[in-house]
């Protein structure tokens, strides 16, 4: 019987570390040798390769890879004919979308998109930027930027279209944003032929389920506590559980163990209230995956 293997692209570059960490939480442990583009993983049914996110849609579309992880921005930049299996809300520095913005020097006379008429724009997102400007009826010169795009204005370009997550780099280079042209999130994509293969599709769906579970767990924690019977209703009224908390009777009569998964942002204010309501032995613990 022919060995079944899923060819998976892992984004090399800015998304690499956050992607490998996410896979690790999902249960897949990758090892990358020095200067190697072929990571090993503790799943013999996966053959992985490091590919730049910018190139991932093309290799997946052509079937060099069965699937991979890239940004929505690179899918639309290349007009890639791929199957978007899932949106994964993470980036290099956090769990938020990234933006492609038009930015100009702080002292530039360019105040709006209309002022870009006849100007020179530097960007890595050339094709999408040209289509965007065309849709607005604006004619401008769009040059491909090989890097360090933020330093191009004002001498090498009048404006840039650049990726930003926090805006820190733009501010450091004394640039101001005049327009957002695209909001992008990370996507798990598949080759369309591979998606029709029942084995590969099931394998991809399993991976995506675990990746989503790992992402869901990033924002949540588990809480467990002991509660006397007389305080049970008070404590339960404070718990915003995903569905309902798990309640178990302890061996000591009149006492209960409560387990619940909640948003981590609520814990700081919630624990003192639980303690005041009568809960004891409160334990907060990290989660690896939350599968709805």
Image: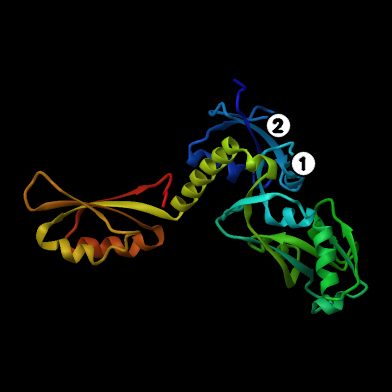
C-alpha separation, residue under disc 1 versus residue under disc 2: 19 Å
Residue 6 image offset from top left, x and y in percent: 62, 33
Q: Is residue 191 visible?
A: no
- Assess disc 1: are there few (<14), some (14-19) or many (≥20) residues with their C-alpha within 10 Å of its C-alpha: some
Colour scheme in use: rainbow
Q: Which residue is mark 2?
A: 37
Dot label at residue 274: none
Residue appearing at x 65%, y 27% in the figure:
33
Q: Which residue is mark 1?
A: 62
Q: Is residue 246 left or right of residue 265?
A: left
- Position of residue 148 relative to residue 208, above or below, is below
- Position of residue 72 relative to residue 69, above or below, is below
Of 105 and 226, the residue lying toward us? 226
Q: Is residue 292 left or right of residue 118?
A: left
Element carrying mark 2: loop
Residue 268 image offset from top left, x and y in percent: 35, 61
Q: Quadrant of the N terminus?
A: top right
Element carrying mark 1: loop
Dividing the picture into quadrants, the one containing residue 156 is bottom right
Residue 209 image offset from top left, x and y in percent: 50, 46
- Assess disc 2: are there few (<14), some (14-19) or many (≥20) residues with their C-alpha within 10 Å of its C-alpha: some
Q: Is residue 176 left or right of residue 224?
A: right
Residue appearing at x 57%, y 35% in the figure:
199
**Which residue appears farthest toward the top when viewing the image?**
1
Q: Is residue 185 left or right of residue 125?
A: left
Residue appearing at x 63%, y 57% in the figure:
185
Q: Nearer the viewer, mark 1 or mark 2?
A: 1
Residue appearing at x 80%, y 61% in the figure:
128
């Amino acid at each position: 019987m022919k060995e079944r293997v899923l060819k998976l692209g892992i984004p090399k570059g800015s998304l690499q570390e956050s992607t490998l960490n996410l896979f690790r939480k999902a249960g897949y442990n990758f090892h990358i040798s020095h200067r190697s583009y072929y990571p090993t993983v503790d799943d013999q049914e996966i053959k992985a390769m490091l590919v730049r996110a910018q190139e991932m849609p093309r290799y997946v579309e052509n079937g060099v890879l069965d699937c991979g992880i890239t940004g929505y921005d690179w899918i639309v930049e290349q007009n890639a004919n791929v199957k978007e299996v899932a949106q994964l809300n993470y980036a290099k520095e956090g769990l938020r979308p990234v933006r492609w913005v038009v930015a100009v020097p702080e002292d530039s006379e360019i105040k709006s998109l209309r002022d870009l008429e006849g100007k020179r724009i530097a960007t890595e997102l050339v094709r999408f930027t040209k289509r965007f400007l065309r849709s607005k009826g604006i004619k401008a010169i769009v040059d491909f930027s090989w890097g360090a795009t933020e330093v191009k204005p004002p001498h090498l370009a009048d404006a840039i279209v650049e990726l930003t997550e926090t805006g820190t780099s733009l501010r450091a280079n004394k640039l101001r944003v005049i327009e957002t042209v695209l909001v992008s999130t990370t996507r798990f994509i598949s080759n369309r032929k591979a998606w029709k293969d029942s084995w590969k599709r099931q394998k991809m769906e399993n991976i995506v389920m675990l990746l989503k579970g790992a992402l869901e767990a990033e924002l949540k924690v588990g809480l467990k506590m002991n509660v006397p019977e007389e305080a049970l209703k008070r404590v339960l009224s404070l718990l915003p559980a995903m569905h309902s908390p798990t309640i178990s009777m302890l061996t000591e009569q009149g006492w209960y163990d409560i387990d619940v998964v909640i948003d981590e942002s609520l814990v700081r204010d919630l624990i003192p209230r639980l303690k005041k309501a009568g809960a004891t032995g409160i334990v907060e613990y990290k989660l690896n995956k939350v599968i709805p």
